Amino acid sequence: MNETDVIKADVIAAIDKPYFTPQELADYLSVSVKTLCKWRHRSGAEYPRWVRVGSQNIAYLKDDVIAWLARKTAAPTLKKRGRPRRWAI
């Protein structure tokens, strides 16, 4: 088994898991793990739901992350029509 096979196996395993680790979710969302930590300590539905696994491990269920992203998706807005602004020089 070469290095490429090991990487492919890791990717397949990550896809099959029903959860993200904090590092995986941070990479997926392009935020830091520290940002996820801050979000966990704030209440409300505006942040992804998480679960505690054991005494110290945190996990984010993929279905919850997908639902959270769907709620965060903005509807397209129409541009306001009218005269363009004239800027004073």
Image: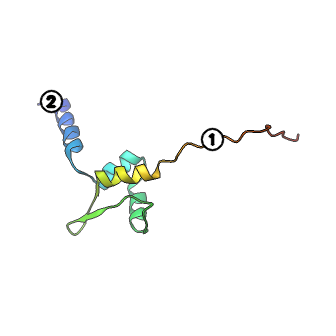
Please tell me which residue is depicted at 45% across the width and 60% down the height of the picture.
46
Please tell me which residue is depicted at 20% across the width and 44% down the height of the picture.
16
Instruction: Residue lying at the far right in this picture: please name it.
Output: 89
Instruction: Residue lying at the far left in this picture: please name it.
Output: 1
Horizontally, residue 2 falls left or right of residue 26, namely left
Mark 2: which secondary structure? loop
Query: Which residue in the structure is indicated by mark 2?
Result: 2
Amino acid at pointer 2: Asn
Horizontally, residue 74 falls left or right of residue 3, namely right
Q: Position of residue 29 (x, y in %)?
A: 40, 48
Query: Which residue in the structure is indicated by mark 1?
Result: 78
Query: Foreground residue, 82 or 41?
Result: 82
Query: Foreground residue, 29 or 5?
Result: 29
Position of 59 relative to 30 (above/below): below
Disc 2 vs disc 1: which is toward the camera?
A: 1
Q: Position of residue 42 (x, y in %)?
A: 43, 68
Q: Position of residue 77 (x, y in %)?
A: 59, 43
User: Which quadrant holds the C terminus?
Assistant: top right
Horizontally, residue 27 falls left or right of residue 72, namely left
Q: Position of residue 36 (x, y in %)?
A: 39, 58
Amino acid at pointer 1: Leu
Q: Earlier in the sequence, mark 2 or mark 1?
A: 2
